[in-house]
Image (cartoon, grey):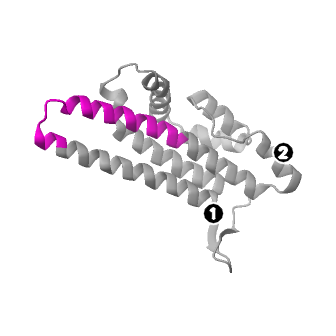
Amino acid sequence: MTARAEALSCWQRLQGEYGRYLETIRILQAQKGVGFLKVQEDLRRYLCLRCAGFLEQVVFLVLDGYLTQKTSGPTRDFARSYFNQAPNLNVDAFTRLIARFGSNHVAELEVFLTTPRRDTLGDLLGIRNDVAHGRVFNGQRLAPERYLILCEEIYDWLIDTFLGESVEVLDGSGRSVVAYERTS
């Protein structure tokens, strides 16, 4: 599976989980159960963790796919040896990672990462560890709707910026291969 296909698969899984969350909340609200608010809060925490995990994974998939498309042989091995797993992200780490791909990418990221997006990304990645360690949050910081929107925006930006106009087609054996890619 190519980077674009893997990233799309990750995005579709996250969308599916969000859809099931909404359906579950609708059912629980209709039943007006005593523990409804606690269950909703737990589900919101789970979705925040999933959104943070999605971003880390999609960043890795897309950037690794970019390295695979742009390099070969020992150069590819060298490049990928420094980037062999999904990174733990915060806003600064994300910015530094993108900066390693050159000033063009930094400029594009600066345009894309507006203050509201930067703040939302900071909130999401900031609460990941807190939630994982049992700290309690509520309100706007645990709003999965806002993080899902951010995930989609970052996903789209990464695909456009790093995989550009690459088109995946099936070769004679039915494998997906890159047929064209942006050269800039």
Q: Quadrant location of residue 48?
A: top left
Q: Quadrant location of residue 51?
A: top left
Percent of width and height locating residue 49: 44, 34
Question: In the image, is residue 86 above or below residue 8?
Answer: above
* Image disc number at residue 165: 1
Label 2, secondary structure: give it: helix
Q: Residue at x 55, y 49 (%)?
A: 157
Which stretch is magenta? Answer: 28-55
Horizontally, residue 163 falls left or right of residue 130, namely right
Q: Is residue 76 magenta?
A: no
Please state, as top left, top right, bottom left or bottom right, where the C terminus lies in the image.
bottom right
Horizontally, residue 127 falls left or right of residue 101, namely left
Percent of width and height locating residue 102: 74, 41
CA gap, disc 1 to disc 2?
25 Å
Q: Residue at x 15, y 40 (%)?
A: 29
Horizontally, residue 42 falls left or right of residue 105, namely left
Question: In the image, is residue 143 above or below residue 138?
Answer: below
* Mark 1 or mark 2, earlier in chain: 2
Residue holding disc 2? 78
Horizontally, residue 124 falls left or right of residue 81, namely left
Question: In the image, is residue 50 above or below residue 124?
Answer: below
Question: In the image, is residue 109 above or below residue 138?
Answer: below
Q: Amino acid at mark 2?
A: Phe
Label 1, secondary structure: give it: loop
Q: Quadrant location of residue 82?
A: top right
